[in-house]
Amino acid sequence: MKILENKRELDELLAKIRTNGTKIGLIPTMGSIHNGHLSLVENSMKENFFSITSIFVNPTQFNDLKDFKKYPQNKKQDIEKLNTVKCDAVFFPQIEELYPEGIKRKKTISKYRDILCDKFRPGHFDGVTTVVKSLFDIVTPDAVFFGEKDFQQLKIIKELIKKNNLPIQLIDCPSVRSKNGMSLSSRYNNFNTNQEILFNQISLKVNNCVNLLKKQIDINNLKNLNQYLEEDKKIKVDYLEVRDDDELLLTQKNKNARLFISFYIEDIRIIDNFKLY
């Protein structure tokens, strides 16, 4: 696996790769690599792309400086994990390469906004689209791989590609879930023992609610789950909603719909979504 520390090293490698017509697959991450990220790499490799995982903890998508500073990072471990799936290259872009005009975010996408995570984390998706567009400009991939766990993000990146007429195929991949049924997340590395126990207890209630909603969308099921969560002072709920896949509109039908959920266990934010069809 090639380890690329800057754009110059990336450019040299891409020039060699493209001489024989090989296509490039990009897997953008903020590191703290887990099996969900590795599944994206594996999907890229199955499609015969030269697979490049980028690792960059993006400051402009954090609303809270404390959250940014405590985001889990382990470069050596990330490299080791990516090596296990034989990723072709890992790229560590420099901040000035992604933000040549200074560290600031731009609002370029207005669709799928003011709901879900965007409602509770203003500016977050502006930071996401700013850094992803920079990565697209630097890497110029043929395809990019994102997981469905961040479903709103997935929709917004699709809109970014469409709006800029980029010749990039976005390939969305199913969430990889732990034994408790919740999607994997780098943030869970920050759980202490008590938080992890609580998270596993909550997962039972969430999965029970999902099973009920698959049979019928009953608002009482959402109310009951919300009430259960808010009974614990360690938990703060951001949203608990059923929305359709296409336009992310609220719906009372489970056809082509998902349960979207976000809550905090103390200072750790959990987001997830579950297909109801």
Image: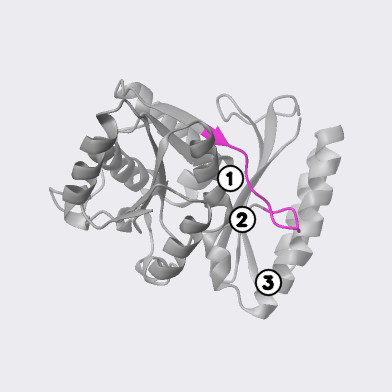
Q: Earlier in the sequence, mark 2 or mark 3?
A: 2
Residue 197 in picture, x, y percent from top left: 73, 73
Is the residue under label 1 in contact with that under label 3 (CB below 8 Å)? no
Residue 70 left/right relative to 276:
left
Q: Is residue 92 magenta?
A: no
- Give the mark toward the camera: 2 or 3: 2
What type is the residue that disc 2 sits on? Leu
196 with respect to 3 (left or right): right
- The image position of residue 234, as x and y in percent, is 65, 72
For image coordinates 42% across by 62% down, the residue present is 79
- Quickly name the residue at label 3: 196
Q: Residue at x 74, y 53 (%)?
A: 181
Viewer-proximal residue among 181 and 171: 171
Q: Using a 10 Å C-alpha cutoff, classify the residue at mark 1 as few (fewer than 14 neighbours), some (14 to 19) or many (20 or more).
A: many
SS majority, magenta: loop
**What residue range appears in magenta?**
172-182
Residue 184 disc label: 2
Asked whether residue 239 appears in the rendered view, the answer is: no
Q: Could you tell me the amino acid type at mark 1?
A: Lys
Mark with earlier residue (2, 1): 1
Q: Earlier in the sequence, mark 3 or mark 1?
A: 1
Q: Nearer the viewer, residue 54 or 210?
A: 54
User: Which residue is at the front of the view, 7 or 201?
Assistant: 7
Marks 2 and 1 in Cβ contact (< 8 Å): yes
